[in-house]
Image (tube, rainbow, N blue to C red):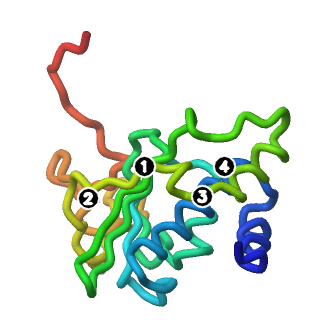
Amino acid sequence: MDHLLWEKSIDFHGHACPGLAIGFKAALAALEKLKINRSSDEELVCVTENDACGVDAVQVVTGCTFGKGNLIYRGTGKQAFTFFHRPSGKSIRIVYHKSRSPHGTDKHSRMMEILAMNPDSLFQFKVPSFQLPEEARIFNSVTCEICGEQAPEHKIRLQNEKKVCLDCFVPYSREIRL
């Protein structure tokens, strides 16, 4: 295990915990299975299906970040991370299986067991069921005619002949929800 990288992950996240360990192991496994190094720009893309602790380790280990546009949130709530390597076209989906995870008596012992485990015992490795998202794009900013704040043009809606942001937009639906 790369102890320096683990310490950087802890510093970034704010504390050590089993969730951080899961993301740390998943990110290392992705780099190893794809036979690549940390992303310096957008060559590696991670689609995370959760917004939990492990995502912080994924950012530190892989270099995928929301700001660069190569960390994408897909809110299924699953402990799953899908990685795409643009230059090689390789991809992998890594899914954590709690049933395979250690059942230590406290958080610290569970975390230490996770860090010591072989990734093949901790995760399922699958072929992604969706395609690589397109590269991040830069959009023109448009000023909302209600609040005066700017938003990218793809997030603007027309309402009563005014350009409005998503916060000011009042959605219309006659759909009956069950």
* First reached walking from the N terminus: tag 1 or tag 3: 3
Which residue is at a point 36% across and 66% down the rendered structure image? Answer: 151
Query: Quadrant of the rendered structure where residue 131 is?
Result: bottom left
Q: Secondary structure at mark 3?
A: loop
Instruction: Bin the neighbour count of mark 1 within 10 Å (Cα to Cα): few under 14, some 14-19, many 20 and up.
Output: some
Q: Which amino acid type corresponds to the residue marked 1 in the rendered image?
A: Gln
What residue type is disc 4 on?
Gly
For the residue pair 145 and 157, the one nearer the viewer reads as 157
Q: Secondary structure at mark 2?
A: loop
Q: Amino acid type of disc 2? A: Ile
Assess whether mark 3 and mark 1 are in contact (beta carbons under 8 angstroms): no
| Whole-number angstrom distance, CA of label 4 to CA of label 1 | 17 Å
Q: Which mark is residue 96?
A: none
Instruction: Say left or right for 173 vs 79.
Output: left
Disc ID at residue 19: 4
The residue identified by callout 2 is 156
Secondary structure under the numbered disc 1 in the rendered image: strand
Q: How far from the left and from the top, in percent, is residue 10?
A: 77, 65
Q: Identity of the amino acid at label 3?
A: Asn
Q: Is residue 52 above or below residue 92?
A: above
Q: Which residue is mark 3?
A: 118
Residue 170, quarter of the rendered image? top left
User: What is the spatial separation of the Cα atoms under label 2 and label 1, in whole angstroms?
Assistant: 40 Å
- What secondary structure is found at the residue carrying circle 4? helix
The residue beneath circle 1 is 124
Mark 3 or mark 2, which has the lower sequence index?
3
How many residues crowd around disc 4 within 10 Å: few (fewer than 14), some, or many (20 or more)?
Answer: some
Q: Are marks 2 and 4 in contact (CB under 8 Å)?
A: no
Residue at image x 71%, y 58%? 115
